[in-house]
Amino acid sequence: MNNLSPKTPVHDTGRSTLAALNDWVAQVAALTKPDTIHWCDGSDAENAALIAKMEGDGTLIRLNEQTHPNSWLHRSHPDDVARVEHLTFVCTPRQDDAGPNNHWMSPAEGHAKMDALFDGCMKGRTMYVIPYCMGPIDSPLSRCGVEITDSPYVVANMRIMTRMGAPALARIEREGSFVRGLHSIGELDPNRRFIMHFPEELTIKSFGSGYGGNALLGKKCHALRIASHQARSEGWLAEHMLILGLENPQGETHYIAAAFPSACGKTNLAMLIPPEGYRAQGWKVWTVGDDICWMRPGADGRLYAINPEAGFFGVAPGTSINSNPNALKTVAHDTIFTNVAVTADNQPWWEGLGGGKPVIDWRGNDYDFSKGTPAAHPNSRFTVSAKQCPSYSPRAEDAQGVPISAIVFGGRRASLVPLVFEARDWTHGVLVGAAMGSETTAAATGAVGVMRRDPMAMKPFCGYNFADYFAHWLSFDAAGAKLPKIFHVNWFRKGDDGKFMWPGFGDNLRVLEWMIRRVKGEAAAVETPIGHLPRPADLNLDGIALNQEAQDKLFGFDHAGWQTEFASIGQYLEEYGPRMPQALKDEQQRIAAALG
Ligand code: SAT
Ligand code: MN
């Protein structure tokens, strides 16, 4: 680290037995010059003291104690409400290693830029040292990190989202290695904001934002960008996927991992409640995770997955007793809400909640209905422990993870892409993931609703060159592997009237059921150049009314449309030059040829 000044006298509450950690903390303190250093132990007493401090200075506002015990509202800076992809960098010695999918800076330049911002930034503040573990504390698949931050809001969120404090520190001291994450909210100035990753140094530096994926460094920065890089060299996968268990009436549970871009319904799918008829028969969905999945081959050749997170950082708008009753029950207490609106009796409120009336908007102003602007920010969030979720899987904390039977890719596609199709084999499935497209959402700043390629929903999160990432995916098809089947879904197909044609939410179970029946060799499908498609009769559509247009579009195959799509996929693969694996280009050409 540059810019080291002579040791500043600071009050330090703790130390570790690990010299490398103590040295790093001392170096950071010398650079950032905090008044106090607080080593987080993760205890209830520590949390209570932090919450009281934040209530005192207005960082947290207590919500209605009767309806939402122990729950808080945080209003972020109005310019700091989402991830900032244009300010997010991957710093590798060679630019090619970061790939065209990342903004790049050389490590030397990145460190110099960040260290200049961090210089003296914690004067008058407390510096918190947060040891955390991503994944169950006793799991060989888990990995640890330490985040240093000057934001007590980040500490409170990290306590919910990760296994934080003394047990994590003990594991770090045993293992001797950890991901280093340095964060400061700085002045929350969008012109002095950067999120930098140094994958080869297992280091993150984030400055100028207090929001979600920019600031809770265990999440996207560590568990996806740094972890994807680590996973490549260690033979596993770090993915932007939910994990759910689907239990059938025979009591058999199959686990499914599904990748969708941010704000495309991962939390809703992970907490799905089966439709009435299915429930009566005994179908259940178990939630293992709603955002991130780490998986690796087990001794039997199957892929085993853990959720590295301990909580949910879910999108509030659209969450209702109809769309996601499990989420609503999960956030009934001990929850931090960020940028939601509040009602006259101080309950949290957001668009789509379906009850109550907002009187104060997410900025803290009186809400004016006549303006037609949303009361809650479209990317407002809840942070809550996974343990509070009624459908939390009893196997979610399993050290060995859960075996994955199916991998699902999906995006928001208003046109062309049918409800579901199955890839012919692993290589085809990797191409399906690589070719994924989706319309952008409010989870990142920038235009909403623009179609872009978002391979495996990892466009903002892959810590290295996508061409190498696809090659890594292809490498799992090795001798002895018992790989999951790969599917693609689109819950967001629209009809000529501009309305969604598929009911979605609980009814998505009908599609999951077909997938598992395909895995077991029990369900039929039609072979097409893009993969195996079900006919309407192959799915259980009891009680669902689909008109002819919906049947044709959800289950049909638009030959001319796919010809154009495959030409565009071919161009996309070319953007990566000779690094793009030949097997993927061959697969694209094979399908393009079949399309004629
Ligand atoms: O802000 S986060 O990156 O944590 C959430 C998301 O965009 O998926
Ligand atoms: Mn996400």
Image (cartoon, rainbow, N blue to C red):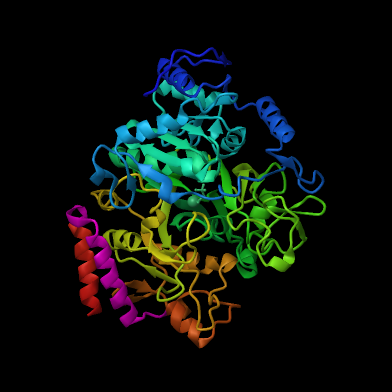
Tell me if residue 44 comes above or below residue 463 in the rendering.
above
Q: Point out the image quarter for the N terminus.
A: top left
Residue for point 76% across, 45% down: 63
Residue 96 image position (x, y, % from top left): 23, 46
Viewer-nearest residue: 328 or 140: 328
Q: Residue at x 35, y 72 (%)?
A: 532
Image check: 59 left or right of 64? left
Hey, which quadrant is residue 226 in on the image? Answer: top left
Image location of residue 215, percent across then percent down = 51, 39
In the rendered structure, does residue 574 fall within the stretch colored magenta? yes
Q: Is 563 part of what is drawn in magenta?
A: yes
Residue 437 is at least partly visible in this image: no
At a point 59% along the width and 65% down the height, the residue shown is: 506
| Magenta stretch secondary structure, dominant | helix
Q: Is residue 443 above or below residue 556?
A: above
Return the x and y of residue 104 as percentages of the image width and height.
32, 44
- Give whichever of 492, 535 is nearer the camera: 492
Give residue 422's quadrant in the image: bottom left
Residue segment shown in magenta: 556-581
Which image quadrant for residue 484?
Answer: bottom left
Residue reaching furthest to the bottom: 548
Q: Quadrant of the C terminus?
A: bottom left
- The correct choice, above or below, for 477 with respect to 506 in the image is above
Foreground residue among 260 and 487: 260
How many dots with numbers?
Answer: 0
Residue 341 seen in render: yes
| Image: 150 above or below 274 | above
Tell me where residue 357 appears, x and y as whole percent. Answer: 77, 61
Give whichever of 534, 437 is nearer the camera: 437
